[in-house]
Image: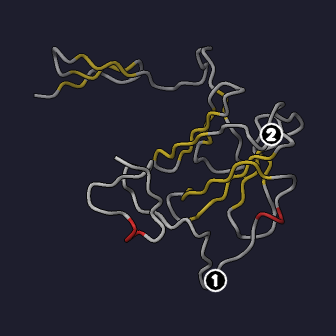
């Protein structure tokens, strides 16, 4: 086995693998497409992490950016306005640098973040002013319906509904 760069991709011979587990990539840079627009210069601060995905019933694409100043910003591109989505807009997250390891995962239209400095957080897809929600081990007080599934009876029990059983 040898390490062989895959530029050009034809340079990989049979039975040769690179550190990308033989996944071919274009390492020559980011290529522009017709209609591209520069968005990072309009972000308030120095971006250190960028992601994007569909929100709002899958109809609107949002960009989400974390900055070294400790603020998270989100924009749906409808105007040049970036929403401050920190849990408390006046309080930044401390310790962000260009080498801060931030990971994300989209589950449908909800995005989850882990910045290795704070508890995990997520951005729910709800109408109104978007805000990151921090993980907490404190029980929420605003759950309207609690569900309990009893597999031995195939029944669904709720605190406010009458039991429903699958036959």
* Label 2 Cα crowd, 10 Å radius (few <14 / some 14-19 / many 20+): some
Q: In which image quadrant can residue 74 be found? A: bottom right
The residue depicted at 40 percent of the width and 68 percent of the height is 11
Image disc number at residue 6: none
Residue closest to the eye, 142 or 18? 18
Q: Position of residue 157 (x, y in %)?
A: 31, 19
Residue 138 falls left or right of residue 118 = left
Most extreme residue toward the front is 2
According to the image, label 1 marks what residue?
A: 35
The part of the image, by quadrant, that contains residue 149 is top left
User: Where does the C terminus fall, quadrant-wise?
Assistant: top left
Q: Which mark is residue 97?
A: 2
Left or right: 87 as drawn, with respect to 2: right
Q: Is residue 115 above or below residue 42?
A: above
- The picture places residue 145, in percent across and down from the top left corner, at 45, 25
Q: Earlier in the sequence, mark 1 or mark 2?
A: 1
How many numbered marks have been drawn onto this rendered protein structure? 2
> Disc 1 or disc 2, which is closer to the eye?
2
Q: Residue at x 72, y 51 (%)?
A: 65
Q: Secondary structure at mark 2?
A: loop
Distance between the alpha carbons at the discs numbered 1 and 2: 31 Å
At x 54%, y 24%, the residue is 143
Q: Residue furthest left?
A: 167
Q: Residues within 10 Å of mark 1 (few under 14, many from 20)?
A: few
Q: Nearer the viewer, residue 44 or 102?
A: 102
Q: Is residue 128 left or right of residue 33?
A: right
Residue 141, horizontal then vertical, whole percent: 61, 19
Local SS, label 1? loop
């Amino acid at each position: 086995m040898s390490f062989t760069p895959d530029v050009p991709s034809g340079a990989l011979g049979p039975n040769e693998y690179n550190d990308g587990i033989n996944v071919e990539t274009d390492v020559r840079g980011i290529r522009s497409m017709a209609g591209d627009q520069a968005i990072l210069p309009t972000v308030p601060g120095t971006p250190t992490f960028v992601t994007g995905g569909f929100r709002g019933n899958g109809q609107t694409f949002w960009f989400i950016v974390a900055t070294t100043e400790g603020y998270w910003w989100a924009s749906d591109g409808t105007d040049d306005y970036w929403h401050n989505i920190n849990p408390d807009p006046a309080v930044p997250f401390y310790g962000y640098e260009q080498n801060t390891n931030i990971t994300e995962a989209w589950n449908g239209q909800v995005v989850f973040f882990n910045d290795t400095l704070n508890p995990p957080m997520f951005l729910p897809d709800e109408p109104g002013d978007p805000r990151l929600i921090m993980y907490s081990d404190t029980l929420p007080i605003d759950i309207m319906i609690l569900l309990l599934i009893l597999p031995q009876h195939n029944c669904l029990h709720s605190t406010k509904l009458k039991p429903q059983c699958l036959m």
